[in-house]
Amino acid sequence: MSSLQFSNIRRNIIKEGSWVFIGQILTALAALVGIRLITEFVPPKVYGSVTLLIGITTLGRNLFCTPLLQACYRFYPDAERYKSISELRKIITDYLRKSSCALASLMLLIGAISCFITGRSFMGVLALVVYFIATVAQTLEINLLSAARRQKFIALWESLNAWCQPLFAITLVIIFGATTQSVIWGYCVATASIYFIIRILPFTLEGKGKDKHQTTTPLNNLQKNILHYSLPLAPLALVGWVTSLSDRYIIGNILGLEQVGIYTAAYGLISRPFLMSSGIISKTLRPIYNKAVSNHNTALEKKIFYIWIITASAVAAVGILLILFLRKWIILLLLAEQYRSSIALIPWLAAGFAFQSLTFVFENYLYAHKHTKTILLCQSLCAVLSLAITIPLVIHAGMKGAAISCPIYFGLSLFFLFCVKSYFSKKTNLPVNN
């Protein structure tokens, strides 16, 4: 690859990265303000209940929908090369419609039975289902826009969503009281409203309409390839949920909903800068990296990966240091008084999220090379470790035990992924598929 070509790529990275940065900054600010408002208006017990319910919808979305969304992201460069993006959209949308309807029906049935037994309002269940459907639809469009590197529109969409969710939730809490149902309906109305507003804006979403000069022959097995790629990711979604969210359910069962609320507030607060920086780097580099892999451009692939891992490592290290020095101010400014006992959790959570941000880099290497079965193996190991470490530590040390377990299992997962990536790199210059 010539220096001129790489210079053009670098300019594109800077331009697209700038929009990603703006979007992530606005989203992060919204998340921080949102946490401050929610913790001010909503007691820990209610916040803990909201967290657990949203976690259930997240599990359903991860199992039924996320594998297809990952396939959409990975196969976009192939579809773009053969001018078959509309075909890709149609296949993914058809699968998502079926899986989402199946899960929504199951949620409504289970919710109706639960409400009949407990006497609770069915409106909370309905809010969860609408929120789930709106989130799936929104994520599909954002994935397609991200794969197409249309970062400006993604920044607009994600920023609006991040600001409106807590504001709508707080508005409903003020009107109807600080209940779990009010918060969930706030999230639901915000997400659904923004989705419909974006859909009527005067710009074309990716894959809408017929591609010009479409060439279907090279992608005539696209539907089969998407299924082959996606199926191993369904159990992967479950083990990923166990790793990232099971600690809240462990705390809830052992310590109660109030402790879940306090832990989740600190977790969301400290995870945000790491998720923001990881999102900026990933959304900027992943489409270029996927395209390099798809085009078998080994030189560019290696350059992008090294830039990715070095940048992610530097940002993670700086993030840990800043949080350690500023943790008292962070808690004082961004959490209401009844949540501030979580200050002891911050150093442990920061270390865990730093390790997690690096695991994303190695996982994206495996996603790009279609090693989905290997990703399943790695994340299964991490899920088992998270349960084996978190449960005894929570029993022994309470919330702090859950925080201490975070860097242990994410650190072990990072080491295992590093070994797997090294194995594939040494096996061949361009790793073969599973």
Image: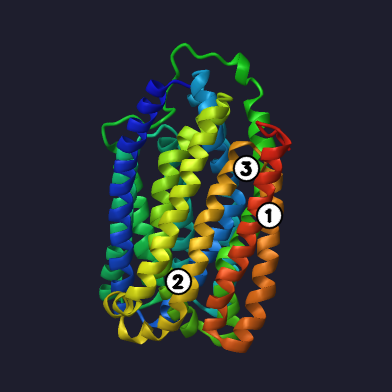
| For marks 1 and 3 on the same chain, the one whose residue lies earlier in the sequence | 3
Residue 6 picture quarter = top left
Q: Tag 1's secondary structure?
A: helix
Q: Amino acid at mark 1?
A: Cys
Question: Residue 379: image x %, image y %?
Answer: 66, 56
Judge whether 109 appears above or below 369 on screen.
Answer: below
Q: Nearer the viewer, residue 424 or 283?
A: 424
- The residue at the point 32 percent across, 31 percent down is 11
Residue 175 picture quarter = bottom left
Q: Is residue 299 left or right of residue 420?
A: left
| For marks 2 and 3 on the same chain, the one whose residue lies earlier in the sequence | 2
Residue 411 picture quarter = bottom right
Q: Tag 3's secondary structure?
A: helix
- In which quadrant of the rendered image does the C terminus lie? top right
Question: Residue 380: image x %, image y %?
Answer: 69, 58
Q: CA distance from mark 1 to mark 2?
A: 23 Å
- The residue at the point 27 percent across, 36 percent down is 201
Q: Tag 2's secondary structure?
A: helix
* Residue 267, disc: 2
Q: Nearer the viewer, residue 156 or 201?
A: 156
| For marks 1 and 2 on the same chain, the one whose residue lies earlier in the sequence | 2
- The residue at the point 58 percent across, 42 percent down is 365
Asked if disc 1 and disc 3 are in contact, CB closer than 8 Å, the reply is: yes
Check disc 1: other Cα within 10 Å, few if <14, some if 14-19, many if 20+.
some
Q: Amino acid at mark 3?
A: Leu
Check disc 3: other Cα within 10 Å, few if <14, some if 14-19, many if 20+.
many
* Residue 378, disc: 1
Residue tagged 3: 366
Q: Nearer the viewer, residue 142 or 277?
A: 277
- The residue at the point 43 percent across, 49 percent down is 311
Q: Amino acid at mark 2?
A: Tyr
Q: CA distance from mark 1 to mark 3?
A: 11 Å
